[in-house]
Structures are given as structure tokens and as C-alpha cells.
Image (spheres, rainbow, N blue to C red):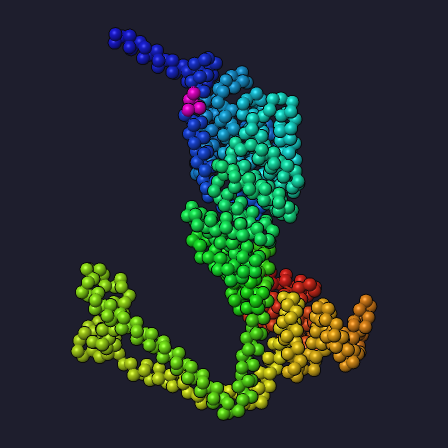
């Protein structure tokens, strides 16, 4: 019996050794290597591939504010390619790398590639130029897919080509062709990809039996990728429609439908877009994020009518669902948009703020929310708040160079100048109003102010006393019922203890042996005297009156500064923010305040243009007659009289040009401060608007020569923003871009 077992054991060992050979074409050899490849090496490789694919799907963050990519991959842009593929053809004989090239596996896809190479190198049975191991084609396909996700597209195509050339009748040949087309798309070889996919999906599908639904889905999805890459959106939509006729892969189908809906929305086809998004909502196995954002997209594409109430009800129901906590920022934002469309501004602001406070709010989402709030306050002329929200957009934005973010930045900078002028006007108006009062009126005004101040301070002091008293009573009760809880965890008892310590020990210095009797408390007399001095000045009416300017020169400078602010605001509201009512308000108020003579013509002409735009004939005629009567020889009068003729003003033009040349020569002679001073004096007198940007640019250059980089940058930004369409403005933009590098 034992002898028989030995014989059987020896036979089994010899059989296994014999089966290990890859050079013998026997049933045992073929099946041994096929089973070992499939259930050992390839199994581990495919498992590693699944782990890598799962990590991509879980970590990839979709930006639903833009058109989603059809394939959710974020490849690096700096791919180093030695050559571009020509017509997608490769020899395919060197598809598998050497052992040295796969020695280190740093990712799941590297491990998958390593296992695929191991299967090919150890279990390939290439006998008489024919592969006898039926699992090797699977190994090459896995090798190509792993390389694809490792962003090595040319080697991936080599692996796919090897399968196509050597296994034309394999069951996975169609899948391999689709993967090869995708790799060609990544290498910008869309033409070959489109031709090969159309042959597979159209010609081959019609000549032979119908392709499996899974192959059709993958093929049309890849074809849509190619058409998107070539901007053939109509054909891309047709491919996406074909790809979503079945739902073998619900995740990819949901993505394809979302992209299709976004395409319809970009073409202003809200009905078609909503139909597609509703399909996602009703798709049973679609990922939750697509369902939520599909509901939001439906609300975005819906017209502004009474039916928005039903959408709001749906969104609020989603908000109440605890499973949707990760999407609260987007849901609250869209509810805010619907409220804003109904002119329910207070409710819109409330929902926008809830969107910002949502846990794990998306930074991109926050930029849109901050911008909405900024726009709302801007429309209400609350420019300080609007500026703060625009600043928040710039702080939160991850891509600072995006077009939308750059527009917000430009608006924020314009608002900064506007707010500065508004603050100047407000401050100077207050001072001038006080300076114009009699002494008795000033005393009465500040007596009321001091009384209100005392009342406010007393209220604050009483509140602190109440808190202290509450802490004392709470602390005493805590000492008897604390049950061992740590004393310093309670803020009220801590405050009580601090007060008790100060009563017992006074203000002791922070030093060693502080409890000794010889140690004195910190001297607080100086501090108390300072506080008393500050308090006395705070309530001292004469000290306030003494700060009111009485010198005529100072008062005149305040008026000039205020008037210049009104003038600048009038132009900013007209030219940069197109807020014509506010522009009229500032400029017409300036006319009542005795503006400088050189400002009058510009004020009249700007008001004439504004009223002409507003179709206010009486006002337009009034300012038109003022210009024609008082400034008949100026270019503005010529423009009004002959709007279609070219303006000629040789005398004034030559004088202005002469001044510019003189200043330019002074600039060359390094007289930078003098150039700036002279330009400041000349600018209000220049009547030709074409030359003003030249003087401003020369002034910016001069400032950059004797001031710091920040002053130079601010001066150039002013020219770039104010005169952006002129040659000087474009030059200033280039300089600003260089300074920020």
C-alpha cells in the first residue's frame, strides 16, 4: 500500500514538472498554464486594477459648474511624448516591458501591470508562432489598461495592438479596439479613433450579429469623447444618446446623461435639458451625487414663473433628508437663486448664508455664493458689503486665473476706489458741516453726543457687572455641587475665581514667591490715571470742538478734496458701473458746490451724454445749450453739432502735445517728482480725451522711478482699469502682468 502511494506521488510530481514547461503543446501543459494564469497571476492583477479604478471613482471631484468630462480622469498635462502615433499603428511585438522596468510597483495600476507582465513572461506558450495559452490575450488587455491609467498611452496602444494583430477572433477583441481608440483620443489622434469606432459600431454591427449592449455603451461613450475633443458637439450628442439607450453601467450612463443635459442647457434648450436630467433622477442605480445635481440642474434650467414653487418644495425636501448633508451648500444656493428670481431678496440672502455655513462646503460653490451676495448688495448700493463679498471670492477661489475670478477681481478693485471716494466725501461733509456751525450749535451737538456715549458706556458696564454677579452666585453653588468636575472647564466659575483672587491678593506681579508679604501688588496707579485721562477726554466737549478746523486754507482743501471725490465718483458710476442715476446724483450735486472752472465742461458733457442715453429730452437740451453757449469753441461743442464728423482742434491739440513732449523730456532727465506734480495740475485742463491716457501712463512710469513697487503697481493698475481699451491701457496691463510674476 505504501509502495503504491509512493508511485502515485512520484507520478504526480513528474506530471507537474512536465506540465510546467511552456515549450510542449499538450493538453496538460495548456490547461495547467491557463488555470495558473487565470486564477493566480491574472486574478491578482485584476483585483489590483479594480482597487485603482475604485480609488479614481471615489477620489475624483466633479465640478458641476462646468461641463463634466465623459471619462472621470484627471491626467497630468505635462506628458512627455517622444513621438505622436501615426494612424494608431504599432508593431506590438515589444508590448511587454522587461523585468527591470516593472521592478517597483508604486500604485494599484503598477501592480496590475506587474502581474500582467509576469503572466506573459512566465506562462506564455508561443509555439510555432502561435499562442497556446488562451489567457495571454487577457493579460495583454490588462497590461494596456494598466498603462492607460498610468498615463503611458503609447505603450498602452502597443499592448492593445498586440491583441488585435494576434488574437483577431478573441472574445475581447471589440473591447480592446475601444480601449485603443480611447488611448488615441488621449494622444490627440481623434481622427483614427473616430474611424475605428465607426467601423466597429456602425459597419461591423450592421454586417454581423448585433454587438452586446455593454460594447455599444462603451463604444459610443468613447466616440462621444472623440467628438467632444474635436468640438463636434452635435455628433457628440448623437453618440451620447446612443450610449444611453441601455444601462449596463449605470454610473457611466448617469454621467453621459448629465453631460448631454449640460450640452442642451448650453444651447438654451431648457426643455430638452430638463427631460434628460429627469431621466437621471429616475435612473434606479445612478450614483446619488448625479441624482442630487440633476435636481439642481432642473431648477437652474426652469423658467422664472410660478412653477418654481414646486421646484423649491422638492429642493427643501432634499435639504431635510439627512443623506444629503454633503450637498447642502449646492441645495441652499439653488433655493436662494429661486428666491432671488422671485425678488424675495431677504430669503435669498438667508439661503445663501446657509449655503456658506454648510459643513464641508465646496470652495468652488462658495465662490458663486459670495459673488451672488456681492451682486445683491451692489444693486442695493451697499458697496462696502459688496466689496467684502467680492474679496471673499478672491480669498476662496482656487484658480485665480479663471476668467470669472479675474472679472470679480477687477470689480473689487474698482469698488476699492469707489469706497475710498465715498468715505472721503462722507468724512469731509461731516467736518465741513460742523465747521459751518456756530460755537453754540457745536456745543449743543457734542453735548448730545457725549450724553449718548455715556449712556452706552454705562449699559456696557452694567452688563459686565451682571455677568460678574451671575458668575459669583454660580461659582458658590458650583463649589457645593460640582461632584468632582474640573473647575477650569466652567467659564463662569473661572471668572468668579479670578475676581476672588484679585480681592485677596490684589494685582500681583508674575514672578516667583509671589505670596510673600514683602511682595507688593503691581502698581496700577499709572494705568488708572491713563484710563481716567482717556475717559475724561472721551466725555470732554471742548476737546471735540478744538479739533474742528477753523483755518480757511484747511477748510478750502477739504472742499476741494470732496468736490474731486464727487467728480471721480460721477465718472466711475457712469463708465465702470453704468449706474446712471448715481452718476447724475454725484455730478449734479457737484454743480451746486462751485466746482473748479476746468471741471465744468466735463460735467456738462457727461450729464448731456447720460440724459441722452436715458431719453430725457429736457435735461439733454439744457446741458447741450450750456455747452454750445459757454464753450462753443471746444471739441465737445463740435461733437454735439456734428456727431458724424471728425473732430478737429489743432490749436488745443498742439498745445497739449507740446506739454506732453516737455514732460517726457523731463522724465528722461530723471525729474520724476516734478513730472508727477505737473501732470496732476494739467489733467483737469486737458480737453482731448485721447491724450489723457498718455499723461496717466507717463505719470505711472514716473511714480515707479522714485517710489516703491506697490505704488508703481497701483498706478499701472489704475491706467489699466480706467483706460483698458486704449493702447496705453493695454500697455499698462502687460506691465501689471509682469510685475505680478
The residue drawn where x is 62% and y is 68% is 718
- Seen in the picture, residue 499 relative to 406 is either above or below; the reply is below
Examine the image and state in which quarter residue 217 appears. Answer: top right
What segment carries the magenta color?
A: 35-39
Q: Position of residue 602 (x, y in %)?
A: 71, 76
Q: Quadrant of the N terminus?
A: top left
- Seen in the picture, residue 316 relative to 58 is either above or below; the reply is below
Q: Is residue 59 left or right of residue 308?
A: left
The residue drawn where x is 49% and y is 34% is 146
For the residue pair 575 and 77, the one nearer the viewer reads as 575
Q: Position of residue 418 (x, y in %)?
A: 58, 71
Asked whether residue 661 appears in the rendered view, the answer is no
For the residue pair 623 and 619, the one nearer the viewer reads as 619
The residue drawn where x is 52% and y is 39% is 282
Q: Where is residue 424 in the image (x, y as percent from the top left)?
A: 56, 77
Q: In the rendered picture of this protein, how many numbered marks are placed on residues?
A: 0
Examine the image and state in which quarter residue 260 appears. Answer: top right
Q: In this view, does 43 lie to the left or right of 672?
A: left
Asked whether residue 642 appears in the rendered view, the answer is yes
Q: Is residue 512 magenta?
A: no
Amino acid at each position: 500500500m505504501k509502495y503504491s502511494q509512493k508511485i502515485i506521488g512520484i507520478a504526480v510530481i513528474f506530471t507537474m514538472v512536465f506540465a510546467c514547461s511552456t515549450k510542449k503543446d499538450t493538453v496538460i501543459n495548456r490547461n495547467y498554464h491557463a488555470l495558473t494564469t487565470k486564477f493566480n497571476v491574472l486574478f491578482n492583477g485584476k483585483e489590483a486594477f479594480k482597487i485603482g479604478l475604485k480609488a479614481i471613482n471615489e477620489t475624483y471631484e466633479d465640478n458641476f459648474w462646468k461641463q463634466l468630462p465623459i471619462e472621470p480622469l484627471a491626467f497630468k498635462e505635462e506628458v512627455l511624448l517622444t513621438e505622436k502615433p501615426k494612424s494608431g499603428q504599432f508593431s506590438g511585438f515589444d508590448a511587454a516591458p522587461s523585468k527591470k522596468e516593472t521592478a517597483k510597483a508604486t500604485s494599484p495600476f503598477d501592480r496590475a501591470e506587474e502581474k500582467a507582465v509576469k503572466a506573459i513572461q512566465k506562462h506564455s506558450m508561443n509555439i510555432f508562432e502561435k499562442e497556446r495559452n488562451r489567457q495571454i490575450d487577457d493579460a495583454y488587455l490588462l497590461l494596456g489598461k494598466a498603462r492607460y491609467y498610468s498615463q503611458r498611452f503609447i505603450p498602452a496602444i502597443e499592448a492593445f495592438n498586440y491583441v488585435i494583430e494576434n488574437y483577431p477572433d478573441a472574445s475581447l477583441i471589440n473591447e480592446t479596439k475601444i480601449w485603443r481608440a480611447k488611448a488615441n483620443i488621449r494622444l490627440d489622434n481623434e481622427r483614427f479613433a473616430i474611424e475605428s469606432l465607426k467601423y466597429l459600431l456602425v459597419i461591423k454591427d450592421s454586417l454581423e450579429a448585433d454587438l452586446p449592449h455593454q460594447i455599444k455603451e462603451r463604444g459610443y461613450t468613447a466616440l462621444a469623447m472623440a467628438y467632444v475633443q474635436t468640438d463636434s458637439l452635435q455628433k457628440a450628442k448623437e453618440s451620447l444618446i446612443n450610449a444611453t439607450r441601455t444601462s449596463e453601467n449605470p454610473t457611466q450612463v448617469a454621467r453621459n446623461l448629465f453631460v448631454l443635459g449640460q450640452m442642451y442647457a448650453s444651447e438654451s434648450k431648457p426643455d430638452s435639458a430638463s427631460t434628460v436630467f429627469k431621466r437621471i433622477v429616475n435612473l434606479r442605480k445612478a450614483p446619488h451625487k448625479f441624482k442630487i445635481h440633476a435636481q439642481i440642474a432642473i431648477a437652474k434650467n426652469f423658467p422664472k414663473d410660478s412653477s418654481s414653487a414646486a421646484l423649491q418644495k422638492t429642493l427643501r425636501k432634499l435639504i431635510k433628508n439627512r443623506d444629503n448633508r454633503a450637498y447642502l451648500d449646492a441645495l441652499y444656493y439653488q433655493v436662494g437663486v429661486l428666491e432671488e428670481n422671485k425678488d424675495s431678496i431677504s430669503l435669498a440672502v438667508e439661503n445663501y448664508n446657509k449655503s456658506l455655513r454648510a459643513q464641508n462646503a465646496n470652495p468652488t460653490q462658495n465662490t458663486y455664493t459670495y459673488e451672488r451676495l456681492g451682486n445683491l448688495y451692489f444693486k442695493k448700493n451697499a458697496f462696502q458689503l459688496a466689496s467684502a463679498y467680492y474679496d471673499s471670492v478672491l480669498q476662496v477661489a482656487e484658480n485665480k486665473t479663471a476668467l470669472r475670478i479675474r472679472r470679480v477681481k477687477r470689480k473689487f478693485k474698482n469698488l476699492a476706489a469707489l469706497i475710498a471716494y465715498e468715505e472721503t466725501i462722507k468724512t469731509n461733509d461731516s467736518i465741513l458741516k460742523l465747521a459751518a456751525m456756530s460755537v453754540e450749535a457745536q456745543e449743543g451737538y457734542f453735548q448730545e453726543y457725549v450724553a449718548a456715549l455715556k449712556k452706552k458706556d454705562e449699559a456696557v458696564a452694567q452688563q459686565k457687572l451682571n455677568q460678574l454677579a451671575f458668575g459669583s452666585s454660580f461659582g458658590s453653588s458650583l463649589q457645593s455641587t460640582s461632584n468632582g468636575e474640573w473647575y477650569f472647564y466652567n467659564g463662569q466659575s473661572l471668572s468668579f475665581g479670578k475676581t476672588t483672587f484679585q480681592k485677596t491678593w490684589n494685582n500681583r506681579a508674575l514672578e516667583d514667591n509671589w505670596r510673600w508679604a514683602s511682595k507688593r501688588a503691581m502698581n496700577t496707579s499709572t494705568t488708572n490715571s491713563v484710563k481716567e485721562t482717556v475717559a475724561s477726554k472721551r466725555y470732554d466737549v471742548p476737546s471735540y470742538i478744538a479739533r474742528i478746523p477753523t483755518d480757511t486754507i484747511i477748510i478750502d482743501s477739504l472742499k476741494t478734496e470732496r468736490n474731486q471725490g464727487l467728480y471721480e465718483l460721477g465718472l466711475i458710476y457712469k463708465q465702470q458701473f453704468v449706474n446712471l442715476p448715481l452718476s447724475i446724483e454725484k455730478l449734479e450735486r457737484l454743480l451746486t458746490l462751485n466746482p473748479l472752472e476746468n471741471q465744468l465742461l466735463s460735467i456738462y458733457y457727461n450729464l448731456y451724454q447720460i440724459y441722452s442715453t436715458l431719453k430725457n429730452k429736457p435735461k439733454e437740451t439744457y446741458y447741450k445749450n450750456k455747452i454750445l453757449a459757454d464753450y462753443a469753441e471746444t471739441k465737445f461743442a463740435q461733437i454735439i453739432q456734428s456727431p458724424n464728423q471728425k473732430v478737429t482742434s489743432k490749436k488745443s491739440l498742439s498745445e497739449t502735445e507740446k506739454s506732453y513732449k516737455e514732460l517726457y523730456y523731463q522724465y528722461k532727465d530723471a525729474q520724476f517728482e516734478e513730472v508727477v506734480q505737473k501732470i496732476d495740475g494739467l489733467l483737469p485742463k486737458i480737453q482731448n480725451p485721447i491724450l489723457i491716457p498718455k499723461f496717466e501712463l507717463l505719470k505711472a512710469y514716473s511714480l515707479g522711478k522714485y517710489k516703491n513697487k506697490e505704488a508703481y503697481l497701483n498706478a499701472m493698475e489704475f491706467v489699466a482699469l480706467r483706460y483698458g481699451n486704449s493702447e496705453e491701457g493695454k500697455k499698462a496691463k502687460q506691465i501689471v502682468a509682469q510685475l505680478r510674476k
